[in-house]
Amino acid sequence: MGLRALGGHALTLAIAAPLVSGVLLVIYAWLLAQTLGRTIEGGESLWAVLSLVATMAAIIIARAVLGMIGEQAGTMGAEAIKKSLRDRLFSHLLAQRHALGLKPASGAVAAALIDQVDGLENFFARYLPAMIAAAILPVAFAVVLFPIDWVVALLFLFTAPLIPVFMALAGWGAQAATDRQANALSRLSAHFADRLRGLLTLKLFGREADAINDVHAASEALRRRTNAVLRIAFLSSAILEFFAALGVAGVALYVGLTYLGFLGINPGLTLSAGLFALIMAPEVYAPLRQLAAHYHDRATARSALAEIENLVADPDNLRSADMTPPATASKPAARLAIEGLTVKTATGATILDGLDLDLAPGKTLAIMGPSGIGKSTLARAIARLTPFEGTITLDDRPLSEWPEPELRGALALIAQKPRIFTGTIAENIGFADPLADRASITSAADRALATQFTASLPDGLDTLVGEGGYGLSGGQIQRIGLARLFLTAPALIILDEPTAHLDPETEAQLLDQVFAFAEGRTLIILTHSATVAARADAVLRMAGGKLLPTPHRARPATAKREDRA
């Protein structure tokens, strides 16, 4: 069933309403011409033509009602089509699978389901009825005028078709511009949503400024394309007005010269017939004006359908643009000191309560504790990603005094669920260093054991993955996130459950690589695993919002005296 059929009787009524209104218009024009002719030329009184006036008033009311009915029916039909299309599109997107399960970016999906589908409304509600009316009514009006004055009829038949021809020429350019504009809108939606979801990762790698610049550039490109569409739309309107004015002026000139006796083509032209031709002249072009007013809706709808088709057929072309992170230089191990750290939720609940920690440079610390106890909150506070009370110093320098780029270069936090952007696996790894060549990215993937699973993929590291790592397992996502670590040179490393989704053998191999990389650096690992914690120089357990020592461990990282109570 086609989209038009989904509009049902409402869309049929929307198409029929302007045609019926056109018939009433001919009757109205004829009655008005007769009324003026009989009163002016025949000298009849107003009472003699009162029935004609009453009929014209009724026709005016009927046409207004038809206009409202047609507009409402068009909207109802378009809404039915949009609902059906959204249901089908949503079902298709849920069912489709691509390679690694690659799916389009959620921003592109939202743009298709909302913006692009909405772009079809005016096509069915306004353009389609206007197009059918423009195809039928001008010809019908000319045929009606033929018995009255064949010259006027021929003038209409000659000028009216020129308008669609020249509008079509302008429409080709409008379609191309609208396609570019719709594509830019989809890319901008996907780009913005992707960056918004990955805000934490952008912040950790010092990439928020680049993301802002990229969104600004994409928005500016969309603005330019939108203006290009508007310029062509104005050109189409200018073409219509030119030929419409030319046709009306031609009829007025012909009728006037005929009455003056300068033209002998139709010397018997009566006042009523001439007035009828003059009244109908602008009405012949009215359906074409209406079509021109909604002509850009056709281009918008075609572009929207093209974007929807691209979305369900080939989501690869909606990949977000690559982003270039700042390079980092090698730094010595950092000393971390925390005193009286308190973090509360927005509702006032305490997560960390006066927590203290002193971690010497170059040492490794494992922090254990049950889920929800505050380990990740501690990591976010150290990374200056959440508000806190108390003091955190890095190399005896308060965290608040660190410039943002310098802090992001000195500290690396790999979250429990690293953010994967739409793109290739290599692009996601290379996100950590814009200057990294292919060899460095491959080496980082090797150290993170990512090549163990990419080797079996058709495109290896160049395999596309979906937004948020769609198509990858939790362990594979973690390895890609850890591969980013090997492209950086931080002084302090914080890893949040780095091996939670790995089997024991892979965990052991990956920990060997992580601790080898952490040589000469300060390392904090937040973990539930006793196996992981056993590799650290010291182990602290989080409880009651504080860090407590664990027995039978030598600890360069020491909890403060009050935490030992």
Image: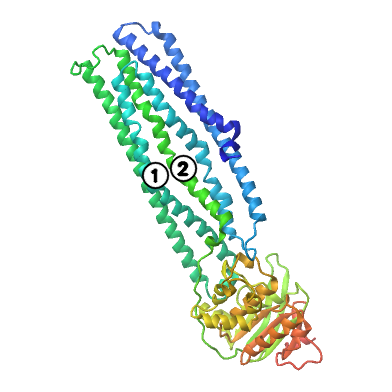
Q: Amino acid at mark 2?
A: Arg
Tell me the CA gap for discs 1 and 2. Answer: 9 Å
Q: Position of residue 528 (x, y in %)?
A: 76, 79
Q: Where does the C terminus fall, quadrant-wise?
A: bottom right
Name which residue lies at 65% across and 81% down. 449
Q: Position of residue 100 (x, y in %)?
A: 64, 66
Q: Which residue is mark 2?
A: 298
Q: Amino acid at mark 1?
A: Gly
State the residue in front, 43 or 241.
241
SS for callout 2: helix
**Tag 1 near tag 2, CB within 8 Å:** yes
State the residue in front, 331 or 457.
457
Mark 2 nearby-residue class (10 Å; few <14, some 14–19, many ≥20): many
Q: Earlier in the sequence, mark 1 or mark 2?
A: 1
Residue 412 visible = no
Q: Is residue 89 above or below residue 193?
A: above
Name which residue lies at 38% across and 51% down. 228
Q: Which residue is mark 1?
A: 171
